[in-house]
């Protein structure tokens, strides 16, 4: 008998797909360059607000969106790789997927942070470049344009590859729950809270995150 579990609450799903759109827009505007760089920065600020929100939601969000639900010990990862462990390990982020999520969040934050203090020495510089040394600006620019970009391409490729692997080999559609929120599992498990009050909390938290980013830009000497 299967049981329907609300795995991904609405704020988590909106965050996920908004982040996908913003990252694609960042890649596109970064490749185009020129006047598109204004939009590159705007999408970067949007990503920063989304990442700040996800950190908050990882503490206050639904059951399966909280970091505590997919912060696994190395022994749990080994058990999962051996095919052991209960269904709770594969309901939300499994131990392998959890590592991918944390890596993406970390390197996206690093990419945004270095973008804020990067300078292409032609026409575009981050709003915080005047607050740090020229040596740090140079290092951040190199990381942002070379290392960080490649790392994110690899991580996104692995993420998409894992989704296709689960769909092809395990006949498990990981995209559907991220669209609709629910997942069919073999035994009853707790659902993520996803009611009007939790959604209101998410909206307030995101508004605060947006406000913090806007405040940073207002105070930054080199902001647009």
Image: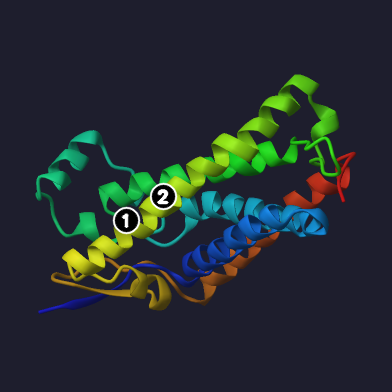
Give percent across and percent down for residue 178: 40, 70
Q: Is residue 190 left or right of residue 23?
A: left
For marks 2 and 1, the one nearer the N-term is 1
Asked if labels 1 and 2 touch by Cβ distance under 8 angstroms, the answer is yes
Answer with the quarter of the image where residue 81 lies: top left
Q: Residues within 10 Å of mark 1 (few under 14, many from 20)?
A: many
Can the viewer see residue 224?
A: yes
Give percent across and percent down for residue 82: 10, 45
The residue under the point 51% across, 55% down is 57
203 and 135: which is toward the camera: 135
120 shown above or below 206: above
Q: Marks 2 and 1, Cα distance to the nearest angstrom?
A: 8 Å
The residue tagged 2 is: 101
Give the SS element for disc 2.
helix
Give the SS element for disc 1.
loop
Q: Residues within 10 Å of mark 2 (few under 14, many from 20)?
A: some
* Residue 34 marker: none
The residue under the point 12% across, 50% down is 85
215 and 146: which is toward the camera: 146
Number of disc labels: 2
């Amino acid at each position: 008998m299967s049981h329907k579990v609300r795995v991904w609450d609405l704020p988590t799903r909106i965050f996920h797909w908004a982040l996908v759109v913003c990252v694609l827009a960042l890649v596109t505007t970064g490749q185009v360059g020129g006047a598109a760089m204004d939009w590159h920065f705007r999408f970067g600020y949007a990503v920063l607000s989304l990442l700040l929100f996800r950190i908050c939601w990882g503490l206050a969000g639904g059951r399966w969106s909280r970091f505590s639900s997919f912060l696994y010990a190395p022994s749990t990862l080994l058990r999962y790789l051996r095919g052991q462990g209960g269904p709770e390990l594969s309901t939300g982020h499994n131990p392998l997927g959890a590592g991918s999520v944390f890596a993406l969040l970390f390197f996206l934050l690093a990419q945004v942070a270095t973008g804020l203090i990067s300078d292409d020495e032609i026409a575009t510089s981050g709003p915080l470049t005047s607050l740090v040394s020229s040596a740090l600006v140079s290092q951040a620019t190199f990381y942002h344009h070379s290392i960080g970009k490649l790392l994110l391409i690899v991580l996104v490729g692995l993420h998409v590859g894992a989704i296709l692997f689960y769909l092809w080999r395990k006949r498990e559609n990981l995209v559907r729950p991220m669209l609709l929120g629910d997942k069919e599992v073999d035994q009853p498990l707790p659902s993520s809270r996803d009611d009007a009050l939790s959604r209101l909390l998410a909206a307030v938290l995101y508004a605060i995150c947006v406000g913090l980013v806007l405040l940073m830009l207002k105070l930054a000497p080199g902001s647009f």
